Amino acid sequence: MIEYLLTAFFVAQPVPVASAAPGAAPAPREEKPRLRDPVEITSKRVRGSRDQAIFSGDVVVKQRTMDLRCDEMTASYTGPREVTRVECAGNMRLVDEGRTAQGERAVLDVPSGRLVVTGSPEARDPTTALRGSEVRLLMGARGMEYEVDDAVVTLEAAPLRTPRKGGGKEGGAQRFPAEITARRVVGSSTQAVFTGDVVVKHRTLDLRCDKMITYFSATREVSRAECVGHVRAQDGARQARGERAELNVPTGVLWLTGNPEARDATTHLRGSEVRMTIGDANFEVKDAVVTVESAPSVPKGKGAGKGPPGKSPDNSQSGSTRQP
């Protein structure tokens, strides 16, 4: 009986009927008032006052497609008894279609559908996993729209295109998730914007910059990423840096511009554009200036080979491409 009364208390709020214009026919009397989006709350115990109710013990909140559960919840409402704000504490778990979230505390603004989760918060959908100090989700949106502070984000990457050995068609698709950390991220169904100390770990690549935008395919997989500001990339023994970079995820190709430089154990390259492919030992450089480490000179004296000592070669070259 208590659960039934609580449900009726928060649900039976009619949408106001617009007043008829002068001369217009009155609305039919048999038309019943429509209800707002109902907020149904059940719990083991509740105590209430004029403007709020406190629920404790196995609290369950249901609104539209959302199922929210916690140990204790405070519901604030207006004069007409409509719920406007829900605060949860203790073992908060949420399910909304394909999305889930959890944490120790959560605040839901009912009119806007904005949920703020704190206390080791986590959230995920089929292609995205989020962790941080605070996770903010927009409930009811198509796809997961989110903001995360001190974010650690794991994104499903578009499959890698791998050519078959000996040429021919591409081989089977391989998937490698990308883990991204940043001070803040704002995401939607089409892209995510990362700002502040951005670090990307994808396959053997470690990519860092000040700001990054990732773009999603129709299936919510990362297909492309753009980096701006102090870009640094490392892939095995190779390093590169510049002011801007673009990563094509399916091909694994990274382009750096803005005074780009690249190096490996024996070679330093500069140019107008540096191109490197994840897992490949080569660089491609446009308008290149290449400095190559020369072999050491053979010392004079015992054990030295015959013939005159050769001059040390000039170690600077200019060209368009260098492939170590």
Image: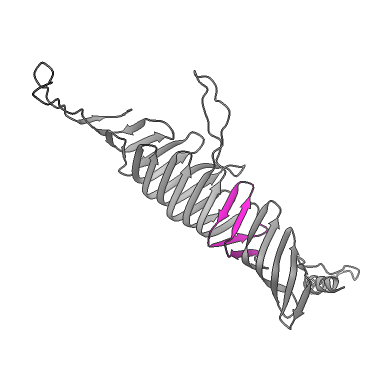
Choose between 142 and 59: the one closer to the eye. 59
Specify whether residue 190 is in view: yes
Which quadrant would the C terminus be assigned to in this image?
Answer: top left
Q: To which quarter of the image does residue 291 belong?
A: top left
Choose between 209 and 82: the one closer to the eye. 209
Which residue shows up at 81% across the image and 73% down it? 6
Could you tell me residue 168's position as x and y percent? 53, 19
Q: To which quarter of the image does residue 138 belong?
A: bottom right
Residue 262 on the magenta span: no
Q: Is residue 83 above or below residue 253?
A: below
Marks counted in the figure total: 0
Q: Is residue 219 above or below residue 53?
A: above
Furthest residue toward bottom: 50
Choose between 97 and 292: the one closer to the eye. 292
Which quadrant would the N terminus be assigned to in this image?
Answer: bottom right
Could you tell me residue 313's position as x and y percent? 16, 26
Which residue shows up at 51% across the image and 56% down it? 151
Type of secondary structure dominating the magenta stretch = strand
Could you tell me residue 50's position as x and y percent? 73, 83
Q: Is residue 48 left or right of residue 232?
A: right
Q: How is the image coloured?
A: one colour
Could you tell me residue 136's position as x and y percent? 58, 62
Q: Which residues are magenta?
A: 113-141
Which residue shows up at 56% across the image and 33% down it? 174
Furthest residue toward right: 30
Specify whether residue 21 is in view: no
Q: Is residue 294 left or right of residue 81?
A: left
